Image: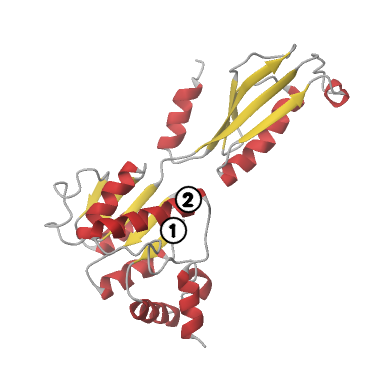
Amino acid sequence: MEIDIFDEIQKMRQLGRKAALATIVQIRGSVPSFQSAKMLIRDDGSTLGSVGGGCVEAEVWTAAQDVMRDEKSKIMTFDLTDESMAESGLICGGKVEIFVEPILPTPKMLIFGAGHISTQVSKIATIAGFRTTVVDNRPVYANADRFPEAEAIHSESFEKAFEEIVPDENTYVIIVTRGHQEDQNVLRWAVQTNARYIGMIGSKRKIRSIAEQLESEGISRERLERLYMPIGLDIGAVLPEEIAVAIVAEVIHVRRVGFKHPLSKKLFQTTHT
């Protein structure tokens, strides 16, 4: 049975896997395919569909690896009248333009803490396209009434949640619990995962204290320096809603632009000088 490319794209996203979709967007002259023809390149290297075969598809496949890694689209132009194409048998006398775009899994956000800031973070993150999970050991706070948009809610102990949740490179961890000890426990667990982003709320003094404690326990400086502490972009936020905007904005920045130099590194330098 023939597999539909769009069904496969949906399946890849549900599985949390990456792919790249190549589409012929323009044809001039004679080419061995048709406009809108598509080829899906999965993260394991396998493909579905075709955009013409030969060296064209080989180059598209190679470009797809970069597109998946960088999460940025790319336009490729092939001149099939070129002599280099003749060696592959693609002598068609035409030109083709192919758009290669990333197919990314829906990003996941783990929100530890179910207070006022967390309710706003969950709402805004959901609007921004994240699947949110809320974790708090207080069922009166961590429930569907307060977080109707959350995909999952863990209202037992944090330790139980640690056993059930496995963050990957598509996961963004937000730590805004009710207390210093809970923050430290969550952070200790989070830095040993593959989460793409880990941010924690708190004063510089609190952050230094927790960082020094975790480092004394043997957690490497390299792991700790990748943390975003204090969490959120510096926009002068005061209200819970404003703080939530700052947090989600920083997460989006990391997702779309890449890892920026977190303030936590400066705090470590201050602590150890």
- Crowding at label 2, few (<14), some or many (≥20) Cα neighbours within 10 Å? some
Which residue is at 52% across, 58% downward?
A: 259
Q: Where is residue 133 in the image (x, y as percent from the top left)?
A: 29, 50
Q: At numbered mark 1, what does the secondary structure look like: helix, strand or loop?
A: strand
Residue found at the far top of this picture: 30
Residue found at the far front of this picture: 236
* Residue type at tag 1: Tyr
Which residue is at 49% across, 76% downward?
A: 266
Q: Alpha carbon of mark 2 to alpha carbon of mark 1: how far? A: 9 Å
Q: Where is residue 50 in the image (x, y as percent from the top left)?
A: 63, 21
Q: At numbered mark 2, what does the secondary structure look like: helix, strand or loop?
A: helix
Residue 5 in sight here: yes
Q: Give whichever of 178, 1 is nearer the camera.
A: 178
Q: Are marks 2 and 1 in contact (CB under 8 Å)?
A: yes
Q: Give whichever of 120, 4 is nearer the camera.
A: 120
The residue beneath circle 2 is 255
Which badge, 2 or 1, comes first in the chain's sequence?
Answer: 1
Which residue is at 29% across, 53% downward?
A: 121
The residue beneath circle 1 is 197
Q: Is residue 219 left or right of residue 209?
A: right
Q: In this view, does 266 lie to the left or right of 134?
A: right
Residue found at the far left of this picture: 140
Q: In this view, does 105 lie to the left or right of 24?
A: left
Q: Where is residue 67 in the image (x, y as percent from the top left)?
A: 60, 40
Q: Position of residue 163 (x, y in %)?
A: 32, 58
Corner quadrant of residue 246: bottom left
Corner quadrant of residue 232: bottom left
- Report how many numbered discs are placed on residues in the image: 2
Query: Is 13 located above or below residue 272 in the figure?
Result: above
